[in-house]
Image (cartoon, rainbow, N blue to C red):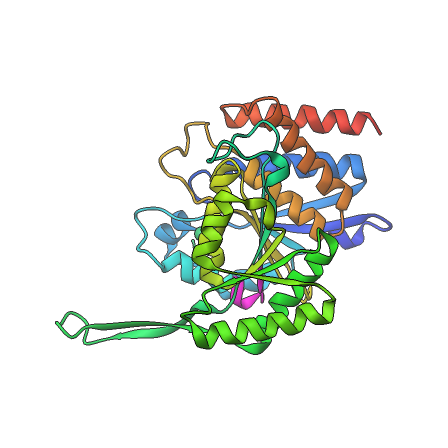
Amino acid sequence: MTTPDDVAGTRAYAIAHLPGDGVGPEVTEVARDCVDAVAVSQGFVVEWRGYPLGARHFLATGEVLPDTVLDELRKADAILLGAVGSPEVPPGVLERGLLLRLRAELDLYVNLRPSKLRPGVAGAVGRHQPADLDFVIVRENTEGLYAGAGGTVHRGTAFETATEESLNTRAGVERCVRYAAGLAARRRGRLTLVHKTNVLTHAGDLWRRVAGEVAAEAGLPLDYAHVDAACLYLVDDPKRFDVIVTDNLFGDILSDLGAALTGGLGVAPSGNLNPDRTGPSVFEPVHGSAPDIAGTGRANPAGAVLSAALMLDHLGEAEAAADLDAAVSEVLGAGAPATTSGWEDALREALDAKAGAR
Ligand code: IPM
Ligand code: MN
């Protein structure tokens, strides 16, 4: 078998494809086709390797993420994930067993979630203009309330007690803020820490000190907003945000707000990054498997295509990434298609036009 490394002199990438459940396969198929199209026009080679993980696979086999599959995934250059989940699988099984396990095992300590209002998209608030809304959330992705610390005692009794502890390490906070500061320096130079330091005085204090140190070292001013106020500012005056750095749960919540402000979950991309590149990073649309619209042909693949653009950018294919990003903007600007296949046709046309113009 020819592997990407055999193709001498070409840029070649092995990309693991985890289509998942519901609309996941539908949207990632469009993303794959778009990546294949820009690969041809930009002169690189992609080898796709598919893995059937997710709810369907779990229900059929009892497997969530076998170690052998994880070992295979570690060898990929990047991972493109659709969405996983089904009402038939109990909460937490796939979230903890697959998504959070990948984030921990592959040390994907940054969850990059850009929110950009593109021309032609109204956004939930209506009065925002594209120039008002272009920010990136850098969400810490391996610690905080997602670390899995806590437990239940006296279950099923009147004394039942449940705890979830937020774990924040200096090293974990620092590497996340460092990534955010680097990103802010490449963008508009505006870094905002979002936390709740007035109440979470232990973790908040650590975040505030570390962010202050890192920002000073990077020569950047550091803004700060409490998470409740940040929700208000995001709706009222989003222009003030460029790069937001925040903990795992705040970032989870704020990024759904960011999606609503910029056209909904259908258009929101994410990159679970291992910035140190000790292994592959995972790219996935922020939306879930949407079982209610799966199979109807109405899934919006924009979030998946933009996630693929983040993936190409991470792989060093900046021009290909920019082409995908611009193609999505053009299709949205012309009035978003109502169907997945309409999206696919419009994206391919936009990408062909770019290839032809070169
Ligand atoms: C997300 C999702 C996940 C998260 C869930 C499914 C574990 O909501 O990627 O935003 O909370 O991180
Ligand atoms: Mn979420």
Direction from residue 288 to residue 186 in the image, left or right = right
Q: Look at 62% across and 71% down and name the residue there.
A: 212
Direction from residue 351 to residue 26 in the image, left or right = left
* The one of 38 and 13 positioned closer to us in this rendering: 38
**Image x and y of residue 227, in percent:** 46, 58
Direction from residue 109 to residue 85 in the image, left or right = left
Name above or below for residue 20 compared with residue 171: above
Q: Which corner quadrant of the image does residue 303 belong to?
A: top right
Q: Look at 45% across and 49% down and name the residue there.
A: 232
* The one of 164 and 186 positioned closer to us in this rendering: 186
Query: Is 194 within the magenta?
Result: no
Give the residues drawn in magenta, as a range.
103-110
Q: Does residue 53 appear anywhere in the picture?
A: no
**Image x and y of residue 348, in percent:** 66, 27
Q: Does residue 123 appear anywhere in the picture?
A: yes
Which quadrant of the rendered structure holds the C terminus? top right
